[in-house]
Image (cartoon, helix red, strand yellow):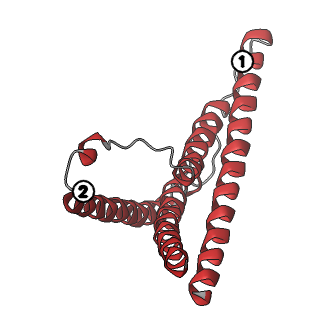
Amino acid sequence: MKNNSISYELLKKISNYIKYLSMILAGVFLVINIADILVSVFFRYFLSYSLVWTEEVARFTLIYSVMFGSVAAISYGDHVKITIVLEYLPDIISKIIKIIVHIIIVGIMAYMTYLGIKYVDNAWRFQTLALGIPKAIPLMSIPIGMGLFLVQYILIEIIGINKDIITRELEMRK
C-alpha cells in the first residue's frame, strides 16, 4: 500500500505539473496572439501600414496555444467523448471497448508525435517567409503538443487505476 501510495502521489504531482505548465503556456501564447492581432489591426487601419510578420506570428502562436490547451483540457477531462452507447452495454463489453479506445488514443498520439518529430527534423533547412526563422520552430508544436498530450493521458489513466486500487484497499480494511 505504501509503495503504491508513493508512486500514486509522485504521478499525481507530475501530472499536475504538466497540467499547470500547459495552462500557463497556452495562456501566454494566446496573449501573444491577441496582442499580435491588435498590433496588426492598429498598424493597418490607423497608420495605413501593414506589418508582414504579424500573420505568421498570429498563426504560430494560435497553434501552440491550441496544442498546450489540449493538454490542459485532457487534464480536466474536457475533451469530447461519446459515452451514451457504453451505458447500455453489459459491463464487460463496456470495459473492453474502453480499453480498445485507450489503446487507439495512445497509438494515435504516439504516431502523431513520431510523425511530428520526423516533420520537424526535415524542416530545419527551410525558413518561414515573413519571419525568416527555421520552419521547424513553429512545427515543433506538433511533437511537443502530441507528446505532452500522450504523457498526460497515460498519467491520468495510471492515476485513475491507482486511485481505484487504493480506494478498494481502504474499503477492504474497514
Vertical comparison of 81 with 43: above or below: below
Total residue callouts: 2
Q: Which residue lies at the image location 26% right of the left edge and 48% below the top edge?
A: 86
Q: Position of residue 116 (x, y in %)?
A: 43, 60
Residue pushed farthest right? Answer: 47
Nearer to the camera, 30 or 170: 170
Give the left or right position of residue 155, taking residue 46 as reference: left
Q: Position of residue 22 (x, y in %)?
A: 65, 54
Quarter of the picture holding the N terminus: bottom right
Q: Amino acid at mark 1?
A: Val
Q: Position of residue 89 (x, y in %)?
A: 20, 50
Say the numbered circle drawn on residue 17.
none
Q: Which residue lies at the image location 48% right of the left edge and 69% below the top edge?
A: 164
Q: Considering only order in the chain, which callout, 2 or 1, is on the residue closer to the N terminus? A: 1
Nearer to the camera, 168 or 46: 168
Q: Tell me the residue that label 2 is attached to.
A: 94
Q: Amino acid at mark 2?
A: Ser
| Residue neighbourhood size for the residue with mark 2, other residues' Cα within 10 Å, grouped as few (<14), some (14–19), many (≥20) | some
Say the numbered circle drawn on residue 41.
1
Q: Which residue lies at the image location 68% right of the left edge and 35% below the top edge?
A: 33
| Secondary structure category for the residue under label 1 | helix
Residue pushed farthest bottom? Answer: 3
Look at the numbered discs 1 and 2 and tell me whether their residues touch, using CB distance below 8 Å: no
